[in-house]
């Protein structure tokens, strides 16, 4: 069984006028270093919060978005135009495969797999390291 949010993603693409824009292969450009001090403040912080809420909702069926959505959450207080552009980049990434979702296996063999990664001193603002993990059971993400 596959659980996805295809309709929600297509509506999101239309709402933010991203249906006609080119697709991107990654939810966040690896060279993009977002910080609290970059560029001018967003003219409408409520729009940024709204787009963030929608992307956060998608992380339940698209766990590959979790890292970038967490990263965008750090700028909720005073979002900049660069943060809003990065959020729109995530929506453009969703155009690549709007039907992607969670695969729930019916296989009785439940193999537990865990992955982790870390990045030393990667936060521009706090100079803290970032780490993350991903756990699957029977091929389906559980954490």
Image (tube, rainbow, N blue to C red):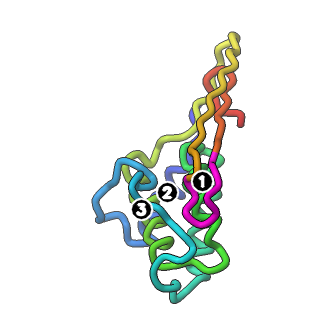
Report if the CB atoms under discs 2 and 1 are less than 8 Å apart: yes
| Side of 31 where 120 appears, left or right | right
Q: Position of residue 75 (x, y in %)?
A: 61, 71
Q: Quick one: label 1, few (<14), some, or many (20+) residues within 10 Å?
A: many
Residue pointed to by mark 1: 58
Q: Position of residue 56 (x, y in %)?
A: 63, 58
Q: Quick one: label 2, few (<14), some, or many (20+) residues within 10 Å?
A: many
**Residue 89: mark:** 3
The magenta region covers 122-130
Dot 3 lies on which element? helix
State the residue in front, 130 or 143: 130
Which quadrant does the N terminus fall into? Answer: top right
Question: Whole-Å distance between the Cαs marked 2 and 1?
Answer: 8 Å
Q: Quadrant of residue 21?
A: bottom left
Dot 2 lies on which element? helix
Q: Position of residue 134 (x, y in %)?
A: 64, 34
Q: Earlier in the sequence, mark 3 or mark 1?
A: 1
Numbered disc in front, either 3 or 2: 3
Which quadrant does the C terminus fall into? Answer: top right
**Can residue 29 be seen from the camera position used here?**
yes
**Can residue 53 be seen from the camera position used here?**
no
Identify the residue shown where x is 39% and y is 55%.
31
């Amino acid at each position: 069984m596959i659980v996805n949010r295809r309709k929600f993603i297509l509506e999101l693409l239309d709402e933010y006028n991203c249906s006609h824009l080119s697709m991107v292969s990654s939810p966040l450009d690896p060279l993009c270093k977002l910080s609290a001090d970059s560029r001018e403040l967003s003219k409408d912080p409520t729009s940024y919060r709204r787009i963030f809420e929608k992307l956060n909702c998608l992380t339940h069926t698209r766990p590959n978005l979790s890292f970038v959505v967490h990263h965008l959450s750090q700028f909720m207080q005073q979002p900049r135009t660069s943060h809003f552009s990065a959020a729109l980049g995530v929506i453009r990434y969703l155009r690549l495969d709007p039907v992607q979702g969670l695969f729930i296996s019916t296989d009785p063999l439940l193999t537990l797999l865990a992955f982790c990664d870390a990045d030393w001193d990667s936060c521009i603002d706090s100079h803290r390291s970032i780490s993350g993990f991903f756990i699957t059971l029977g091929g389906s993400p559980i954490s």
